[in-house]
Amino acid sequence: MDVREGEIAVEVPGARDGASEGAGDDVFYNPTQELNRDVTVAVLRAYREREPRAETYLDAMAASGIRGVRAAAAGFDVTCADVEEEAVELARRNFDRNDLPGEAVLRDANALMHDSVFDVVDLDPFGTPVPFADAAFANTRDLVCVTATDTAPLCGAHQKSGIRKYGCVPQNTDYHSEMGLRVLLSAMVRTAARYDKAAVPILSHVTRHYARTYLELDARATKADEAVENLGHVYHCEDCLARDHEFGLVAHPPEECSVCGSGRLLVAGPIWLGPVCDPDFAREVRGRVTEEMGSERRAKEMLDTLAGELDRPTHYDQHRLCKQWGRSASAMDEFVGRLREAGFEATRAHYSGTAFKTDASIAEMREATAE
């Protein structure tokens, strides 16, 4: 069948709602990832102005080729790679159909990345991106874009799998989506640092069942050291929901919660504790979201929230807190407004409709938002 996204029209055999690109024996197109692809195009447009030398782009797992074809329409010199011959032929047809230059090659992504250097590499695998991270960070000049769809290991629901794949301890908390993103960022930053490169997240988001991040590279060992300094641990109380964080690769967890005295503390880490995006760049990306994009409204709303999101790990869930306090939840804007009126920093967070960030303690939140 044929689909249109943005400025292009492509052929996508086997399309079905809820299917993941790369899943199964055939080449699939995942319509639920349109927001991901729309934001990617907007990022590429904005990044060309941020770094004019960035010209070459690798779609490392091409599937239908739609991501690479859209990158070509944004002005990049695109290579699509896939290990399935059907996918490679399909990507070639889609380049031709849109009268766009682009190369599609039958290659394993890791082998290709070891042989070639690209300005921008996009990893959008089925599941974890970890098997491709070393080759990507070793042989990319400017920007590595990463999607992870294995949210259960990332957020701690499948903790042993998360430990094996990502080299840290994730914990399944009420801010599980942010936990997953910060676990992913930790693994990517540590991988880049092995090659004396800093991987700095300039935009990241969690949407539906995936985490997505865009990591700008700096090939200075001193900057890699600075990036590693943003890793640390979160200490989470399972009883009162208070949490604290500590920078450093070695954890020093308290024996009990400093708020309620509970000994039921979860320790997560080392996870990324630094900013998950550059607010100025998020605003630039928003300005590159255009009306022909199918997810225009959702993308702009998400980017607005990201640009204003308080830079602080981790977010709270208003409904979870209100249930803990035995009260009904008020409207989110009213809830956040009361925190601000009480003198605290507070913003909504993009992770869910009831997510927010603040510098207030649990007790201060409860008092400031009381009826």
Image (cartoon, rainbow, N blue to C red):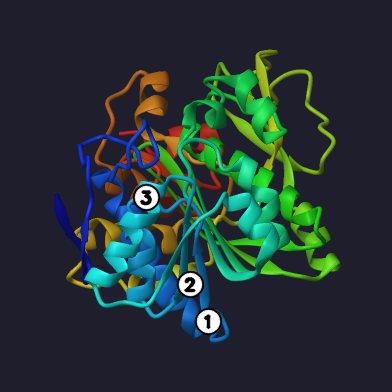
Residue 16's spot in the image, x, y percent?
20, 37
Please, what secondary structure does the residue beneath circle 2 have? helix
Q: Could you tell me if residue 237 is visible in this image?
A: no
Which residue is at a point 50% across and 69% down the rendered structure image? 57
Local crowd size for mark 2, using a 10 Å CA cut-off: few (<14), some (14–19), many (≥20) = some
Please, what secondary structure does the residue beneath circle 1 have? helix
Q: Are the residues flagged by discs 1 and 3 in contact, CB closer than 8 Å? A: no
The quadrant holding residue 221 is: bottom right
Give whichever of discs 2 and 1 has the lower sequence position: 1
Q: CA distance from mark 2 to mark 3?
A: 33 Å
Residue 232 vs residue 294: left or right?
right
Question: Can you identify the residue that label 3 sits on?
Answer: 87
Of 366 and 213, nearer the camera is 213
Under mark 3, the amino acid is Ala
Of 83 and 323, nearer the camera is 83
Q: CA distance from mark 1 to mark 3?
A: 32 Å
Answer above or below: position of 170 versus 149: above
Residue 4's spot in the image, x, y percent?
17, 61
Question: Can you identify the residue that label 2 sits on?
Answer: 281
Question: Can you identify the residue that label 1 sits on?
Answer: 50
Residue 230's spot in the image, x, y percent?
73, 52
Query: Which residue, as the protein is rendered here, is positioned at the far top?
Result: 263
The quadrant holding residue 72 is: bottom left
Q: Could you tell me if residue 97 is visible in this image?
A: yes
